[in-house]
Image (cartoon, rainbow, N blue to C red):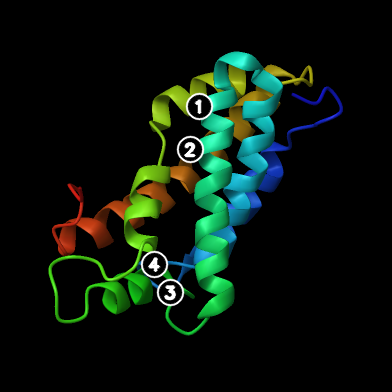
Amino acid sequence: MSENVSFDISAVINHFERSSYEKDDIHLISYVQAYEELSKLFSILGVIFSFVEVDVKEKRSILRSLYEKDQQNYVTVQKMIAYEFSGSNVPNGQGSRTLLRMVPNRQRLIEEIFANHTQDPTPENIEVISTRFLEVVNDVYNRVQTLYEEKNLLNLP
């Protein structure tokens, strides 16, 4: 893992904020960009997280490729699900399944971010950043979960 990598929690927050689309949808590329920044954290955390970094990188690549090939149907999570499940209970593409497996355990992720933050922020800054991070991540996570629950997709094989 590269020692020159720096992780910016503010960038993650900004990407997740931008990914919130309309009332209940997620803009796919902004979501992928948030994970690109999170991957820097996995890199910094070292060998124990290298498998996570590789896995997330592969999933980001798949989602970005789907978007680049078909921006109309892969612009948001809702459109992706509608497109991949049109007329079927089984996805006709790999985006829905890939995204479902990319969502990490929120609590574990939050613990790692703040346990290994490279800056020495004040307690007040930690509180502000962590509160905003939790708000944004929870909103995005809940939107994705709801979209998948509505279509009974949380247990895709």
Tell me the kind of residue under disc 4. Answer: Val
Q: Earlier in the sequence, mark 3 or mark 1?
A: 3
| Residue highlighted by disc 1 | 110
Q: Residues within 10 Å of mark 4 (few under 14, many from 20)?
A: many
Q: Name which quarter of the figure residue 116 lies in.
A: top right
The vertical placement of 130 against 84, above or below, is above
Q: Earlier in the sequence, mark 4 or mark 2?
A: 4
Give the CA distance from mark 1 to mark 2.
8 Å
| Residue highlighted by disc 4 | 77
Q: Secondary structure at mark 1?
A: helix
Left or right, 75 with respect to 85, comes to right
| Residue highlighted by disc 2 | 134
Q: Earlier in the sequence, mark 1 or mark 2?
A: 1
The vertical placement of 23 against 12, above or below, is below
Q: Name which quarter of the figure residue 126 lies in.
A: top right
Give the CA distance from mark 3 to mark 4.
12 Å
**Closer to the eye: label 4 or 2:** 4
Tell me the kind of residue under disc 3. Answer: Glu
| Residue highlighted by disc 3 | 22
Q: Earlier in the sequence, mark 3 or mark 4?
A: 3
Q: Secondary structure at mark 4?
A: helix
Residue 87 or residue 103, whichever sits in front? 87
Give the CA distance from mark 2 to mark 3.
20 Å
Q: Name which quarter of the figure residue 107 lies in.
A: top left
Q: Are marks 1 and 2 in contact (CB under 8 Å)?
A: yes
Q: Quadrant of the N terminus?
A: top right
Q: Residues within 10 Å of mark 1 (few under 14, many from 20)?
A: some
